[in-house]
Image: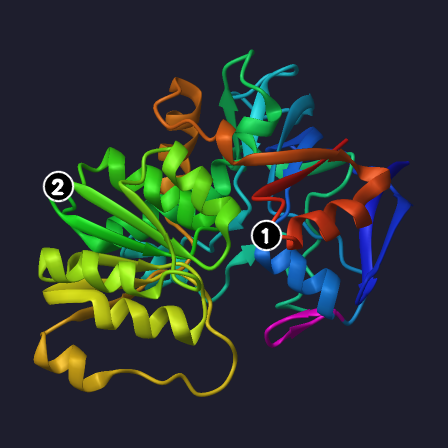
Amino acid sequence: MEKACVIYGARDIRLEPRQSAQPGDTAVRVRVRAGGICGSDLHYYFEGRNGDFVIREPLIPGHEFAGEVEAVGARVSRVRVGDRVAVNPSSPCGRCRHCRQGRENLCRRMVFLGSASKFPHIQGGFREVFVVEEANALPVRADLPFTTAAFAEPLSVALHAVARAGNLFGRNVLVTGAGPIGQLVLLCARKAGAARIVMTDIVDQPLATARAIGADAAINVATHPGDLKDYAAALDGFDTVFECAGNHHALRSAFENAGPGAVVVQVGILPAGDTPILANIAMGRELDWRSTFRFCDEFGQAVDALDRGTIDVAPLLTAAIPAPEAARAFELARDRSQSLKVQITF
């Protein structure tokens, strides 16, 4: 038997035994060591739902995790027992037109770990042992911390968002929302050659981290709303804006501070219901408003970047908390004045 973190409803998470599975011929059994708490996990814990996806049976959350291979199936050849791996939580069908066109993230038959989008629910990785297909377990070097490898999934999201924006070389970039995804977008945009990057938020703590990892300016728009306006005016607006906060105020700011011909990439998930859009600004400036959803082949790119150390995510990790204290981990993860990325360890 193994232990797993199981959500039954709002603020009801339990550490319970679960039967350990054996890997099939093409699968591997991973001893999970670290898993990051994502925004969707927070919604499941605090609200018992993530948007339209309501918990209807006990759900094991977690889709950002890494661990050590402890058993392999008979036909497994790429990974070996003892390898450290980052786990890709996406399993597209590979046959639909979206998959054939290289847009696997849009697959309607997608199986995504730790999600109540389907029933029975797709159980996730906040457990001691997890069995995945070999293709979903990407090896990393033997000395890479598990806590670093567990950043592969959110880093993939940031890499996909940057890819959706197009060429960033020499461009002036605004990132609204300094949470973990916003910070990772900052790192990826810098790596992509952005000339200037400005980060905004309404909390000072994550803005301090943004400055430390390379933001040219980090502005608290709650206490200094005029500073962003002045910065944008000096540039004749930003060339590219990543909206990572997922709220209507930030989206309005993204449109207002985008320059003529700019690209606005919607990364944050907006609240349910109608969304006000500054359509006249978009038209008058000929803005491109683009969406981004999860990732495609960027997962491999993310693992490579973490493995080589070309993107340093260590400053974003606030705490790694043992699974028996999962409730405390979720409470800390929601407190943006104290934390960025919180992980659960096993």
Is 49 colored magenta in this rendering? yes
Which comes before the other along the chain, label 1 or label 2? 2
Where residue 271 appears, x then y in whole percent? 51, 76
Quarter of the image for residue 19 reads top right
For numbered disc 2, what is the local secondary structure? Answer: loop
Q: Answer with left or right where residue 259 lies relative to residue 98.
A: left
**Residue at the location (74% across, 61% down)?**
45
Where residue 1 appears, x then y in whole percent? 91, 36
The span from disc 1 to disc 2 (Cα, nearest Å) is 31 Å
For numbered disc 1, what is the local secondary structure? Answer: loop
Q: Is residue 95 visible?
A: no
Q: Report the residue marked by disc 2.
A: 169
Where residue 309 appears, x then y in whole percent? 40, 20
Q: Which mark is residue 336?
A: 1
Where are the magenta residues, as a range?
Answer: 48-55
| Above or below: residue 51 compared with residue 221 | below
Q: Nearer the viewer, residue 30 or 198?
A: 198
How many residues crowd around disc 2 within 10 Å: few (fewer than 14), some, or many (20 or more)? some
> Looking at the rendering, in which quadrant would you find the C terminus?
top right
| Amino acid type, label 2 | Phe
Determine whether label 1 and label 2 are within 8 Å by CB. no
Quarter of the image for residue 194 reads top left
